[in-house]
């Protein structure tokens, strides 16, 4: 569904069809772009493994910290390919706390073939610090690479999802403090409809715990 059709449907459902509009096109477009990002994060809709700009990072010996592409929010697979032609290996995602507890007491100062990766919000850290050059090859979930802008643009996600993006835009429009358009009840209903379709948004702590390679144990409970 093209952007112009999403805007048209928004105006029908919001009963905002007569100029001058209560909601400017630029605001509706911004809400729809937010909706696509929200849908991607909640539903893990875009899995990237091919785009070199997103999935490949040049690694230099002696440097452990690198920036992630700004569209990539959750890693699912990491491979380190040495530049010297030796056999590469998978890298496990973990946390600093897990390394402190389980693996090394002096991991922060070690320099070896990297075995682990710590993912922060916008950066990653290889552990141990690599002692050879190479390349990280990543796979993971991302948000769209570019925003909707032109009226004939289409959301990058599957077209089956497009119509449900309007609910997010409606929720934002009815939440704007405006005596003529503000409607807390309709805002809540629209946001709930969006959540019912795309799911709850996982918070940053949940995403971090989910992606880390932390052992899980079943603890018996006796009544």
Image (cartoon, rainbow, N blue to C red):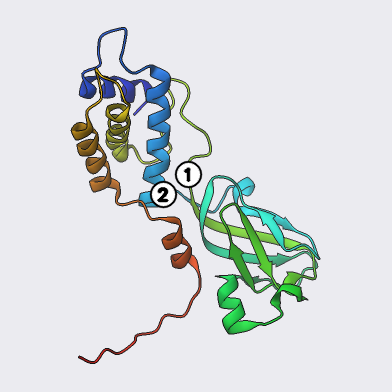
In the depicted structure, whether residue 110 falls above or below residue 56: below
The percent coordinates of residue 118 (x first, y second) are 60, 66
In the depicted structure, whether residue 127 falls above or below residue 202: below
Residue 205 appears anywhere in the view = yes
Q: Secondary structure at mark 1?
A: loop
The percent coordinates of residue 88 (x first, y second) are 68, 71
Q: Residue at x 28, y 33 (%)?
A: 171
Q: Which residue position holds label 2? A: 41
The 10 Å Cα crowd at callout 1, few under 14, some 14 to 19, many 20 or more, is many
The mark total stands at: 2
Report the front residue among 137 and 129.
Answer: 129
Q: Secondary structure at mark 2?
A: helix
* Image side of residue 102 versus residue 200, left or right: right
The percent coordinates of residue 33 (x first, y second) are 42, 33
* Image side of residue 1 versus residue 86, left or right: left
* Image side of residue 203 versus residue 21, left or right: right
| Mark 2 or mark 1: whose residue is earlier in sequence | 2
The N terminus lies in which quarter of the figure? Answer: top left
In the depicted structure, whether residue 179 falls above or below residue 76: above
Q: Residue at x 23, y 43 (%)?
A: 192
The C terminus lies in which quarter of the figure? Answer: bottom left
Q: Does the residue at mark 2 contact the one at mark 1 (Cβ under 8 Å)?
A: yes
Q: Which mark is residue 143?
A: 1
């Amino acid at each position: 569904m093209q952007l112009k059709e999403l805007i048209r449907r928004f105006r029908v459902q919001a009963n905002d069809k007569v100029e001058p509009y209560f909601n400017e096109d630029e605001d509706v477009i911004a809400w729809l772009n937010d909706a696509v990002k929200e849908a991607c994060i909640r539903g893990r809709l875009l899995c990237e493994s091919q785009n070199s700009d997103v999935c490949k990072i040049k690694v230099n010996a002696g440097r452990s910290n690198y920036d992630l592409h700004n569209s990539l929010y959750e890693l699912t697979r990491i491979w380190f390919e040495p530049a010297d032609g030796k056999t590469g290996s998978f890298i496990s995602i973990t946390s600093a706390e897990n390394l402190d507890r389980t693996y090394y007491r002096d991991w922060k100062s070690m320099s070896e073939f990297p075995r682990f990766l710590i993912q922060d919000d916008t950066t990653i850290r290889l552990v141990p610090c690599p002692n050879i050059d190479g390349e990280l090859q990543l796979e993971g979930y991302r948000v769209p690479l570019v925003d909707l802008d032109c009226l004939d643009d289409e959301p990058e996600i599957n077209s089956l999802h497009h119509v449900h993006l309007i609910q997010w835009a409606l929720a934002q429009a009815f939440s704007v403090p405006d005596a003529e358009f503000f409607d807390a009840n309709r805002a809540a209903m629209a946001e709930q409809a969006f959540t019912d379709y795309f799911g709850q948004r996982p918070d940053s702590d949940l995403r971090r715990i989910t992606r880390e390679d932390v052992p899980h144990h079943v603890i018996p409970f006796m009544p």
